[in-house]
Image: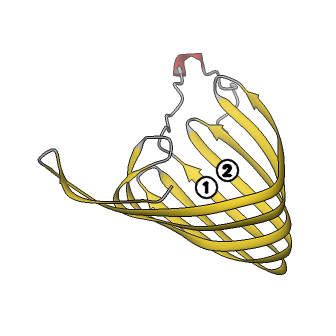
Amino acid sequence: MPKMSTALFKDGEFDPQLALYLEASGSILAGDASVRYETDDMNVYGNAEFAVGHGEAKLDAAIGKIQNQDGSVSYGAKVSAGAEVCAVQGEVEGGFDLFGIKVKAKAKGKAGALSAKGDAALTTDGIECSASLAVLFGGELSLAVDWSEFELPEINWSDVKLPKDWWPF
């Protein structure tokens, strides 16, 4: 759904923002599978997707106050633009969460494709970047690090026991 917003003040307070979002996509056939392992302190996951007869075009840009897709707010700048058509594409994604830091990596392969895309974002929540290029065959790599929920674990130092010979002098 196309979206555009601009603001300098909101509710009487200085709140500068400029955002634009346009996207169109479709596939003849698509599927996915995923696996996840979670504990109280960490999360590890993996996903795989495929599409046949896929096409998309996208423009997403924002600066200042950024309304994220999950409803949260961050500040910074981001831009994403590209277009692609491909006969077949496959994607694998994996990542982990540790102490509130979320790291996600993705690789995509394409055949019978024509594609050029790029993404970059640096905000108060983290950093993201990806690049894609395909002429008949090609691929895409992306990496995202989100530190918005980072917390150092609590360590009870009185429970830490060092060996008696830990200090060599």
Q: Is residue 146 above or below residue 99?
A: below
Q: Amino acid at mark 1?
A: Ala
* Mark 1 → mark 2, Cα distance in angstroms: 5 Å
x and y, in percent, of residue 72 in the image: 42, 41
Furthest residue in direction top, as rendered: 159
Left or right, 117 with reference to 59: right
Q: Is residue 4 above or below residue 124?
A: below
Residue 98 lies in quadrant: top right
Q: Which residue is pictured at 64% across the width and 48% down the height?
A: 103
Residue 162 lies in quadrant: top right
For label 2, the SS is strand
Residue 144 is labelled as: 1
In the picture of the structure, the residue carrying the numbered disc 2 is 104
Q: Crowding near pointer 1: few (<14 within 10 Å), some, many (20+)?
A: some
Q: Which residue is pictured at 52% across the width and 58% down the height?
A: 127
Q: Which residue is pictured at 53% across the width and 22% down the height?
A: 157
Q: Crowding near pointer 2: few (<14 within 10 Å), some, many (20+)?
A: some
